[in-house]
Amino acid sequence: MQGLKKSLLTAVWFMFLTFPIMVIRVDTIEKTIVWRWENLALVGISAFLLSYVWRFFMTRRQMGGSKQGASSAAADRAQALQTLIEDRRVRYSLIAAFAIFVAVFPFLFSMYQVNIMISALIYIMLGLGLNIVVGLAGLLDLGFVAFYAVGAYAYALLNLHFGLGFWAVLPMAAFLGAFVGILLGFPVLRLRGDYLAIVTLGFGEIIRLVLENWGQFTRGPSGISNIPRPDLFGVEFGLQGRIIYMYYVVLALVLFTILVVTRLKYSRIGRAWMALREDEIACQAMGIDKTQTKLMAFALGATWAAMAGVVFAAKTSFINPASFTFLESAMILSIVVLGGMGSTVGVIMGALILILLPEYLRAFAEYRMIVFGAIMVVFMVFRPQGLIRDRRLKRRFHPSETRGVEAAPSGEAVARGVGSHG
């Protein structure tokens, strides 16, 4: 009953707020006012139903923790799914099926779908790069798009002035991105949390304003056009062939990114990043070089962003500062948060959902972004840890190891033995 009252109050409040927009319509030609009361009723009923459903699910969620039966059933299902995935035959079969699907994707779908998938793959690279900084090292970076712009403009300008191609610029842009990442990392070594976010946000805006106002060098808001796409030993492709070749180039770079980022995550520096994320003071007390760890996170994250920028410039053949606004940083951060901070598979899933979903929601026309936003809000409320939570490695003790320890002579016994012989 209390929920009904609150939902009714919410509906009345929404009807009051939307009254001037949804009800009153001024016809300037006829000089009359049209009262659209049916819109008011629609807003009221929709707000009441949504509010009631929302409260119903929130109440169930709060009560879910106390229900042992439901929680144990969910745990059993999760355990069964994990056991199924850990089975090597099942896992390898799934990986093989997915690899075949990805490999033949350009031949199964239209060029429009392939273009969308190329964009999603670029965002996977960006998400994995930001995942190093935010997900593993715990450094909130709101200016990540600046490194993306550095890579894109590096390719465009080097090609424009020196005629360098895609494959020559790609490693150069990676080094340039790492250098700019270190330049940003030095001033923010002592910052964390909200202060770090504000500084990185300012850095991203500085880069964008420099690109926009330094017209003699960057061509300003007009941008740079006719950026060539990557070639294959001078072989000329048609329009469809160029798109398919671009797809495989980006796919190879994504696989390379996944390999390197996964190896980094379980390496010594990866464990240092996670220690820094959990507790900075304890991390320093354990003897980890905080300065080096932070700079490595910024540099490696910026490296992948710059490489993604080169790919973006080659894909679109045109760039300007409007392509690198704060909204891009927000989208990349949303990919990491929605997918699951620190989780490689989660970031990949997050990028695919956030980039592909708005495209496939075009059937809802102008309401697609509202639907998209509502889906994100609901998802974050009911699964705040992300789509796929990062799984920590656990050391398993096997019985054979325990028996080996028990069978081994203790130091005291050895000492007694030595003493008796002495």
Image: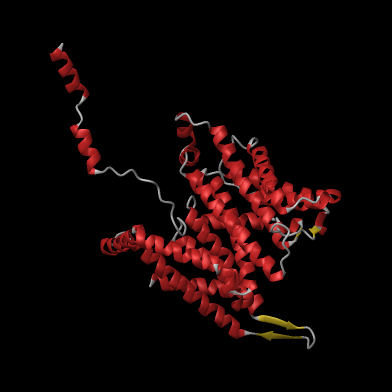
Viewed as shown, does residue 105 lie left or right of 309?
A: left
Q: Position of residue 290 (x, y in %)?
A: 53, 33
Numbered label tally: 0
Q: Position of residue 334 (x, y in %)?
A: 56, 57
Say which of 2 and 60 sits in front: 60
Q: Looking at the picture, does residue 216 appear above or below residue 190?
A: below
Q: Looking at the picture, does residue 186 appear above or below residue 96?
A: above
Q: Position of residue 52 (x, y in %)?
A: 44, 73
Viewed as shown, does residue 124 lie left or right of 240?
A: left
Q: Residue furthest left?
A: 420
Viewed as shown, does residue 355 lie left or right of 202?
A: left
Q: Position of residue 11 (x, y in %)?
A: 52, 74
Q: Quadrant of the N terminus?
A: bottom left
Q: Residue at x 29, y 60 (%)?
A: 66
Q: Quadrant of the C terminus?
A: top left
Q: Residue furthest right?
A: 216
Where residue 371 sits, quadrant-wise, is bottom right
**Any part of residue 417 in sight:** yes
**Any part of residue 340 in sight:** no
Say which of 376 and 421 sits in front: 421
Q: How is the image coloured?
A: secondary structure
Q: Looking at the picture, does residue 276 appear above or below residue 239?
A: above
Where residue 5 sits, quadrant-wise, is bottom left
Viewed as shown, does residue 197 lie left or right of 409?
A: right
Q: Residue furthest bottom?
A: 30
Say which of 363 and 154 sits in front: 154
Say which of 326 and 347 sits in front: 347
